């Protein structure tokens, strides 16, 4: 699942940092990976106001029936409440992998 626009673009508008890749480039790169499916979701007011527990229960568990989840550390740094994903994932039998960025994370 990737968001479009990116959450920082939603919150910061023109002040958001530049993208590393446009949406089309992301889709092309994901196609090269062993990913079963890629879901592109419009980031909107619902997601902006959704807390981590609500997102996990409503979207990941009930709607998507997620079994494996890979999240970027940048997402955790932006939305600190999603730091609970690994614990909540364990509760819901979701395997969670957090990608760490050298020099940015400990």
Image: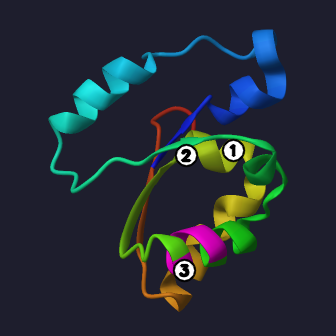
N-terminal of the two: label 1 or label 3? 3
Does residue 39 appear left or right of residue 52 in this picture?
left
Report the front residue among 20 and 23.
Answer: 23
Q: Disc 3 or disc 2, which is closer to the eye?
A: 3
Crowd tier of the residue under label 1, counting other residues whose Cα lies within 10 Å: few below 14, some 14–19, many 20 or above: few
Indicate the position of residue 43 as horizontal and vertical percent values.
Answer: 66, 40
Q: Which residue is mark 3?
A: 62
Res. 65 in view? yes
Q: Which residue is mark 1?
A: 77
| Label 1 to label 3: alpha-carbon separation | 25 Å
| Label 2 to label 1: alpha-carbon separation | 6 Å
The residue drawn where x is 34% and y is 47% is: 38
Q: Are marks 2 and 1 in contact (CB under 8 Å)?
A: yes
Tally of numbered tags: 3
Does residue 61 appear left or right of residue 34 in this picture?
right
The residue drawn where x is 45% and y is 35% is: 102
Task: Please give the label number shown on residue 59.
Answer: none
Q: Are marks 3 and 2 in contact (CB under 8 Å)?
A: no
Identify the element where label 3 is drawn. Answer: helix
Identify the element where label 1 is drawn. Answer: helix
Indicate the position of residue 103 as horizontal and vertical percent values.
Answer: 52, 32
Crowd tier of the residue under label 3, counting other residues whose Cα lies within 10 Å: few below 14, some 14–19, many 20 or above: few
Task: Please give the label number shown on residue 73.
Answer: 2
29 in magenta: no
Residue range of the region highlighted in magenta in the rendering: 58-62
Res. 105 in view? no
Hey, which quadrant is residue 78 in on the image? top right
Report the front residue among 18 and 57.
Answer: 57
Hey, which quadrant is residue 36 in on the image? bottom left
59 in magenta: yes
């Amino acid at each position: 699942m990737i968001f479009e626009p990116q959450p920082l673009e939603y919150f910061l508008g023109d002040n958001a940092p530049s993208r590393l890749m446009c949406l089309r480039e992301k889709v092309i790169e994901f196609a090269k990976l062993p990913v079963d499916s890629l879901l592109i979701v419009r980031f909107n007011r619902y997601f902006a106001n959704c807390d981590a527990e609500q997102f996990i229960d409503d979207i990941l568990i009930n709607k998507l029936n997620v079994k494996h989840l890979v999240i970027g550390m940048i997402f955790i740094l932006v939305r600190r409440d999603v730091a609970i994903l690994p614990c909540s994932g364990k509760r819901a039998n979701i395997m969670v992998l957090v990608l760490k960025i050298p020099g940015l994370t400990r």
